[in-house]
Amino acid sequence: MQPSAALDLAHTHARPVHWLATATAMAAVVAAAGLLQPGAATASQSGSAVTTAAAPGAPAPAPAPDARAATYPLECGGAPTAVAKDASGDLDGDGRPETVTAVRCDAGSGTPPSGLYVLATRRDGTGARVVATLVEPAERLSASELAVRDGAVTATLMGYSSADVPRCCPDQVETVKWRWTGGKFVRSAVAEPSDM
């Protein structure tokens, strides 16, 4: 003998009290989620210099120079320039951040060479100026990575082994570091991790 289908499905008939209980539970979950929001997100470059709040009455620390507001010694034959990468931090230990930027001609195709420049804020505080050139565009290199950590600039530079290599596809890669030493930026190679 089979039990009646009506008896098996008797619990599936929703009554208004069930809907009211479900709506109340959902409202409680939504309200709790609204109260338990995470704090506001902040973005920072990993390894960038740690900044501390200024003492009351002290001037606020100067912002890093804006890479897109500077004029670069780059000849593009009428094409505009493009900031490919930038990173900021205090490179010379004076307490004011500098910006390092990879700038190239906006050629539209291929991998145009970049110039790698260090920017500082103008003495009168109105904009940025180029204070050092780390890589000349004539070196025909481009930067795939760029970082400022612990007062040093690190960049991964890509280049070409010969004129026969297509300009879209650099076949040489080198990671280098610059550190402000003795009144100038000194370049050194970054050792690749060895396989153990």
Image: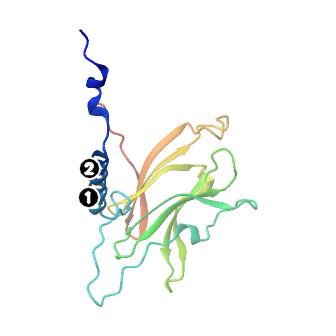
- Helix, strand or loop at disc 2? helix
Answer yes or no: is residue 138 visible: yes
The furthest residue to the bottom:
57
Earlier in the chain: of badge 2 and badge 1, it is 2
User: Label 1 amino acid?
Assistant: Ala
Please state the horizontal and vertical placement of residue 47, each as a whole percent of the image.
33, 58
Q: Quadrant of the N terminus?
A: top left
Q: Nearer the viewer, residue 164 or 24?
A: 24
Residue type beneath disc 2: Ala
Residue at image position (64%, 40%) is: 168
Q: Are marks 2 and 1 in contact (CB under 8 Å)?
A: no
Residue at image mark 2: 21
Query: Residue 32 shows which numbered tag?
Result: 1
Residue 106 versus residue 168 in the image, above or below: below
Locate residue 185, reporting x and y percent. Answer: 43, 63
Q: Is residue 101 left or right of residue 25?
A: right
- Residue drawn at the location 30% of the way across and 43% of the way down: 15
Figure check: 189 above or below 52:
above
Residue visible at 43% across and 67% down in the picture: 184
2 on left or right of 184? left
| Mark 1 surroundings within 10 Å by alpha-carbon count, few (fewer than 14), some (14 through 19), many (20 or more) | few
Query: Badge 2, how many Cα within 10 Å: few under 14, some, many 20+?
Result: few
Which residue is outermost to the top? 1
- Relative height, residue 9 to residue 148 (above, below): above
